Amino acid sequence: MKKLAVYLGLLVSLLSCIWVFQNLDWKALWRALSEVHPFWLLVTVIVFYAGIYVRALRWSLLFPEDKPVASNHLFKPIMVGFAFNNVLPSGRVGEFMRAIYVGKKEKTGVPIAFGTIVTERVFDGVTLIALFIVSMAFIPPIDPGMSVEFGGFVIRGSMLAPLIQKVVVGSIIMICGLGLLMFRKLRIKLLKFVRKIPISESMHQSIEDGLEGIVRGFQAIKQPRRFLWITFYSVLTWVINAIAAQTLGWGFDGITMTLMQAIALVVIESLAVMIPAAPGYWGIYEAGMIFGFAVLNLHPSREVALAYALVMHLIFFLPTTVLGLWYAGAASLKTPSDKTMESIEHGVAK
């Protein structure tokens, strides 16, 4: 099953690359790449990696008070996690490497460290949903005449507008649902409902463990003040990513991007890389960015959109991969086996 997922990811990346590079004006692409303003390129790099530091600040608040970890000790494991997600076919390995690094260096225990990462992902998901809702309220309406063709299928603006409205409503319901999970009686009723769904026992257990993990993650943050700071840093992390997207746009001729459009672009890109793909998200990252440019009407040229995507992808990919692998090597970390990862997850689920 895992091999099938790897092959599926490779196929998705291959098809995405074919779509991205077909019927391309290579001269226009090279011209767009060569005209990127170096000042804004440097600003984007600084802003993007400042966001990783803010991510470290937030992560430090997710550890139990009796097992604190300083934020300046968490930059390296974050880079290690990014690096292994960039080079290995399973996007999950990086999260385990982060937990193993912290568990080894800080003596917190790997399951505790991994539990904080699970909680972090919940905050990221809720924050992205909230920012998507806010950005949709402020960006211009999607042009009904807009169209994006993919493999013979044509996605039109007239199709997307009602779909986005439904997604916004669904997102609001999802956030409310997460809040209701905090109530034990409602959670028990939900688990009973899940038990009635005709799926395998392993899938039942995975869903139950996931729900319990979300609840435990939120309940572990007992101080309201700490919860507010974590929420603040979660929003700030993604807003900084959006600012990085905006500043890079300033480095290209003809790209006009408001902060709300940048937030929407980051959300679209984040959704795109959730699709199974090759290591480093190659192909699917560029396809998601080109789609985002078309939907948000950021630039009429496909070549400029691709140039922007390639530059942003390299800003994220190269430094994190090089530094992350260096940090992992210096710490003598080894890639965990499937059995080790299962035992870590089981330790968190207890």
Image (cartoon, rainbow, N blue to C red):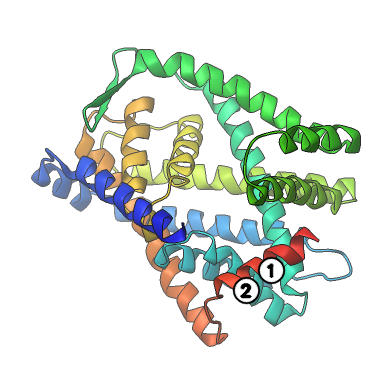
Tag on residue 227?
Answer: none
What crowding class fits label 2: few (fewer than 14 Cα within 10 Å), some (14-19), or many (20 or more)?
few
**Is residue 9 left or right of 232 when viewed as pictured?**
left
Kindly identify the amino acid type of the residue bearing the numbered disc 2: Thr
Q: Where is the C terminus found, in terms of image quarters?
A: bottom right
Kindly identify the amino acid type of the residue bearing the numbered disc 1: Ile
x, y percentage for residue 152?
A: 21, 28
Q: Is residue 170 above or below residue 76?
A: above
x, y percentage for residue 286?
A: 32, 45
Residue positioned 40% across, 32% down in the render:
257
Q: What residue did someone put label 1 on? A: 344
x, y percentage for residue 285?
A: 36, 47
Q: Nearer the viewer, residue 198 or 184?
A: 198
Please report contact status of discs 2 and 1: CB closer than 8 Å, yes or no. yes
Residue positioned 65% across, 52% down in the render:
202
Q: What residue did someone put label 2 on? A: 340
Q: Nearer the viewer, residue 200 or 27?
A: 200
Q: Is residue 192 above or below residue 314?
A: above
Residue positioned 47% across, 80% down in the render:
326
Q: Is residue 21 above or below residue 279?
A: above
Q: CA distance from mark 2 to mark 1?
A: 6 Å
**Is residue 76 left or right of 174 when viewed as pictured?**
left
x, y percentage for residue 89?
A: 41, 62
Which quadrant of the figure has residue 42? bottom left
> Quick check: can you spot residue 75?
no
Residue positioned 50% across, 37% down in the render:
267
Q: Nearer the viewer, residue 305 or 288?
A: 288
Q: Is residue 218 above or below residue 345?
A: above
